[in-house]
Amino acid sequence: MDAKEILKAHTNKLTHLTGEEFDYFFSHFKMQDFKKGQAIITEGDVVNCEYFVISGCLKSFFINDDLKMFILQFAMPTWWASDYNALYSENKATINVDCITDTEVLCLSNDDREKLCNEFHQVEHFFRWRTNRGYVAAQKRLLSFMNNNVKHRYEELLKLYPELYNAVPKSLIAAYLGVSRETLSRL
């Protein structure tokens, strides 16, 4: 499938736009290709887009003062990524987003998303639903960190997202789980 068909299948899970409406919706996205290791958002950047992954894999992460990396999110095909705090509040980026693999994305600017939401109730509903799902996933992950040991979190990750095991280096999975690579190897 091409990028347009992938996005249409993704949005059709929740809302149905006519062919003409979807063409107009799609016209607001910009296709971008990034190479493995390439940064899309760097801490301190102005962020005005969110990214819908067509192919490849992204990671959203934070590096603390001790230079320890904390991965907030992986983004596989049909997942979205950005620094949402910076995007919505017009602050500078506090997280980084880069490519684990060569990646193809559709970029949607904040202004265009707001314009589309104002023009189409179905689009506003879609983005609200997507944001709510992201919030619920983040809440579940936080509760898992507070309540479960690393072995349980690892098993939970593999159960929910088995495709990550082969797509993402184990050192990054360890950073996502908040443990060392050695700890992950012992599991």
Image (tube, rainbow, N blue to C red):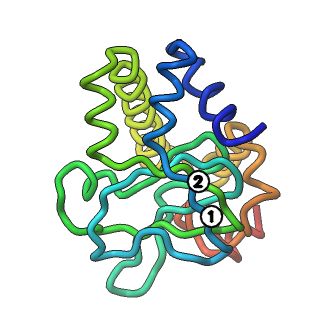
Q: Is residue 50 left or right of residue 3?
A: left
**Secondary structure found at label 2:** strand
Q: Quadrant of the N terminus?
A: top right
**Secondary structure found at label 1:** strand
Q: Nearer the viewer, residue 62 or 78?
A: 78
Farthest-out residue, right: 166
Q: Is residue 170 left or right of residue 89?
A: right
Residue under the image location 67 percent in, 34 percent down: 6
User: Marks 2 and 1: in contact by CB < 8 Å?
Assistant: yes
- The amino acid type, in three-letter code, at marker 2 is Val
Instruction: Give residue 79's position: percent from left, percent from top.
Output: 57, 43
Residue under the image location 38 percent in, 33 percent down: 131
The crowding category of the residue bearing disc 2, from other C-alpha atoms within 10 Å (few below 14, some 14 to 19, many at least 20), is many
Residue under the image location 50 percent in, 51 percent down: 30
Instruction: Give residue 150's position: percent from left, percent from top.
Output: 60, 55
Farthest-out residue, front: 20
The crowding category of the residue bearing disc 1, from other C-alpha atoms within 10 Å (few below 14, some 14 to 19, many at least 20), is few
Total residue callouts: 2
Q: Nearer the viewer, residue 61 or 103?
A: 103
Q: CA distance from mark 1 to mark 2?
A: 6 Å
Image: 143 above or below 181? above
Instruction: Give residue 46's position: percent from left, percent from top.
Output: 26, 68
Disc 2 target residue: 105
Q: Nearer the viewer, residue 72 or 80?
A: 80
Residue under the image location 47 percent in, 50 percent down: 145
Q: Quadrant of the C terminus?
A: bottom right
Q: Residue 98 — which label?
A: none
Q: Residue 33 — which label?
A: 1
